Image (cartoon, grey):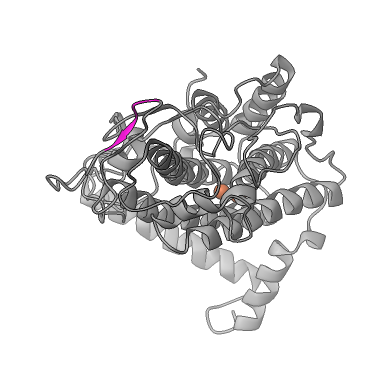
Amino acid sequence: MKKENLPATLSTETTPKSTNENLAIKWERVVRRRSFLKGLGVTGATLSAGTLLATEGSAQTGQSTGALSTGDAALLKFAAWAEIVESDLWTQYNELGGVHGGNPAYMAALSNLDSDMPQYINDNTDDELSHAAFLNSFLLSKGEVPVDLEPFRTLQGSQATGAQDKLRLTSLLNLNVDLSWYTRYRSRENPDLGATFTGPFMITGEPAIPLNDTDTPPNQHQPVPPVTDPEKRMQAIANTAGFHFAFIEQGGSSLYPTLAFKATDPTVLRILVSIGGVEIDHFGLWHDKAGNAVSLPLAGVTDPETGVTFPNLNNPPTELTQTNKILPEPCDFISKGLPACSVIRPTLTKLGGAVATVKAFKADGLFQGQSFAFFRLAMQLALAADSARRGF
Ligand SMILES: [Fe+2]
Ligand SMILES: [Fe+2]
């Protein structure tokens, strides 16, 4: 693993300085800023809103910037790769369980987590498709080659009612869903400062979409709690999806900040920050919904095929398990000597960056059956993105 090499301005180490030294440094900055403004012939009084808007406009419009630097192109290309992957997996969820989905029992089991689940699945899918299409179009508009994963669309998907008969990039048929994010966001410790986390229970070898109609009949009822084995199986599959949604989107929530730190062009920074914010929005939503699979009245479902169990995490309710504690707990940030701060974590490249994302998705089972060439391209794009450095 390459050693983290953040620019000086993003150093995670805080050098202790005396109060006098700090004051001197701050004063020096004020003096420097004033002489800079004077040099421009702009004073506080004449720095009008119009001037600021004009500056913002030229910095943020696509037309005002020239070709992308190698680093900026690499950042956007990896983002495009991730969004195409997300689009593929969300499309599979949407076909079966979205608001216009085709598998009534799966939709009913998802709705047991929240009656709005099918609508949210549909809207999340739309978001990912828009992210992928926008990023590739932006790359094209800058003379870059867009990311094309079509040659890797080789995987067989679900055979259940509702799934379209087409090949996929990702597999949702046998997942190991890492649940460490559940504990991490409830803890006041931060992986960027060395903390490690395990999830509150395990989801291993579990499908997140129905496999076929024999395994889970598409028109069966889905009572709460489920009674028959096929009902239990379908509910466990829907519960897995609920946790998988949050796993994917917390990955995006960490990835985008790590990419944004490295952007040079203000428009590239704007794109990364703006799309990244939507990933965080998704994560917050799914974090809430997943909790309904592990609280009453639904808690306690066991998949009769795999033995995966969704326990009641409110029995007893602890700081690290209570299901309605979905907002990030303030945690260590930058330095353990500073006050706890409620932030996205991790945001260090080695933990949340592009290579880390590819590895996490692979460990999840998302790419089961993919070719060596698929992984080679993924790692090439990821290494290029992680190696980008901010430069002015
Ligand atoms: Fe996205
Ligand atoms: Fe996403």
Instruction: Indicate whether residue 349 is drawn in magenta.
Output: no
Q: Position of residue 336 (x, y in %)?
A: 23, 39
Extreme residue toward the right, this view: 143
Magenta span main SS: loop
Instruction: Say above or below: 246 vs 39.
Output: above
Q: Residue at x 55, y 53 (%)?
A: 104
Q: Position of residue 103 (x, y in %)?
A: 58, 50
Q: Position of residue 84 (x, y in %)?
A: 69, 41
- Front-most of residues 221 and 378: 221
- Front-most of residues 211 and 334: 211
- Front-most of residues 304 and 294: 304
Q: Residue at x 28, y 32 (%)?
A: 201
Instruction: Say above or below: 19 vs 40.
Output: above
Report the label total.
0
Q: Residue at x 12, y 45 (%)?
A: 316
Query: Which contiguous range is marked in magenta?
Result: 306-310
Q: Residue at x 71, y 18 (%)?
A: 371
Q: Position of residue 345 (x, y in %)?
A: 38, 42
Asked where in the image residue 188 lies, by quadrant, the reply is top left
Extreme residue toward the top, this view: 372
